[in-house]
Image (cartoon, grey):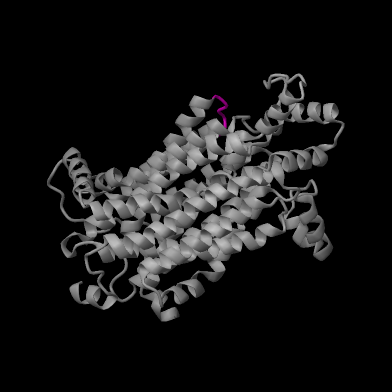
Amino acid sequence: MATIFSKFPRNFWVANTMELFERWAWYGLFNVLAIYLTSSIDTGGLGFTQEQKGPLMGTVVAILYFLPVITGSIADRLGYKKVLLLSFGILSTGYLIMGHLTNYNLVFAAFFFIAIGGALFKPVISATIAKTTNEKNSSIGFGIFYMMVNIGAMIGPFIASKMREISWDYVFYLSSGIIILNFILVLFFYKEPVRPEVSESMSRSIIKALKNIVVALKDIKFLTFLVLIIGFWSVYFQLFYTLPVFIDQWTDTTKLFRWMYDFSPRLAAIFGNGQGAINPEMLVNIDAIYIVVFQIFISGLMMRLRPLQAMVVGIFIASIGIGLMFAFNNPFYLFLSILIFAFGEMASSPKITEYIGRIAPVDKVGLYMGCSFLPMSGGNFFAGILSGQVYGSWSDKLTILQRDMAAKGINIPTISATFTQNDLYRYAEKAYNMNHNELTNYLWSAYSPGNIWYLYTGIGLVTALLLMLFDRIVIRRKVRSPEELEVQS
């Protein structure tokens, strides 16, 4: 194993380290972003509604996943090192600025600015990994790369959760500071890879890239597959868009903390928030831990299935897992439901890109693979709608409380900078003569906000069913085996 690792050049390890830091910074903010945007002002949050949160997160991240088709052309023209420095400059500045804004439009603009930085980074780092691996070690090389992604995604939220207990400002300071470390790596350790000479102008390169997408999407069968996969990503991203808010609103994590404390006071101190509870992002982060531990095992099992079969099985399992996350407000169930979801994610997600390569015409494999990000873009957009307008109407605790107060004829003070969300909850507790947990349990029983699981699970199951029908009925082109692909390459 040591011999295999030694065959990778320095640039490979520098790129992987930069990926780890960039994912650390991104997920350090992203895993807590939904809570930050919607939490009461008096706790340091911005107090936005769910209807504001959904479009902000969904639209911006959708753009982030679409832009690499353009930014990849920019990198080929300007050079990887220059684009990396530009990316890190935008990211570091964006994280810092966003933490000092409270106006919705300005926060939206700052997050969009961060997305531009991320979009500049993504194609460069993936291309660097590709250029520093070969046919013999590319499999393990990209395996290491994927592992770095998940290590960063695991570390970032854990530390950010501790930082926000001190001040929400520290979350943004941390993300900005971690990106600055990447400046050092680029300036002193990263070597510009050999790139083909580009004779055409940047504008022509971008136009050509966009035209290539249009060419690929003219294949109705391919377009149909991409549209179907949007359903999976729409459900998948509820893990970040909705679950943290749902846990924060409806789940009493003090029970879990007390159980953990009885088992190990030190463990409780690590995962607790200093107030006798566990922050939602700590529980959501279990998904990344499961992936780091079980990905190789699950990938080994899925090798026995065709990519489409693995996708269908994975999406089906993930849909059950996401449903169980929302069906109950017992924090102990989250360990099992997130495990089920993670198994489905590990089975399906890696197979999507592989399947695209298998159904693509022999002379258009690269072109089709370049479109693999489009379903993630669409999935984020619709995830924002499901997490915004839909969750806000069906399951948002604040909305349900206001609806119930109106039905009972109780005066509802307007939420403002001087009368926060938490003030309204305290006001309602007095009006109902209930404590916080009693009020939560009453609203849960009366309005069943967990029923949103029917929608999330239903979207996932329908996606799995349609994919199965798509493979059997629509696809006429012979799906090439791995052996055939190897011969063709």
Instruction: Point out residue 124 in the picture as x, y percentages from the top left corner.
Output: 33, 52
Magenta: predominant secondary structure element? Answer: loop
Front residue of 90/67: it is 67
Q: In which quarter of the image is residue 263?
A: bottom right
Q: Looking at the image, can residue 345 be seen?
A: no
Q: Residue furthest right?
A: 433
Front residue of 167/63: it is 63
Instruction: Point out residue 41 in the picture as x, y percentages from the top left corner.
Output: 67, 29
- Quarter of the figure that contains the C terminus: bottom left
Q: Quadrant of residue 435?
A: top right
Instruction: Point out residue 232 in the picture as x, y percentages from the top left corner.
Output: 44, 53
Relative to 483, say whether 186 is above or below: above
Relative to 195, say whether 107 is above or below: above
Query: Where does the magenta region start and end?
Result: 99-103
Q: Looking at the image, can residue 265 be seen?
A: yes
Front residue of 394/487: it is 394
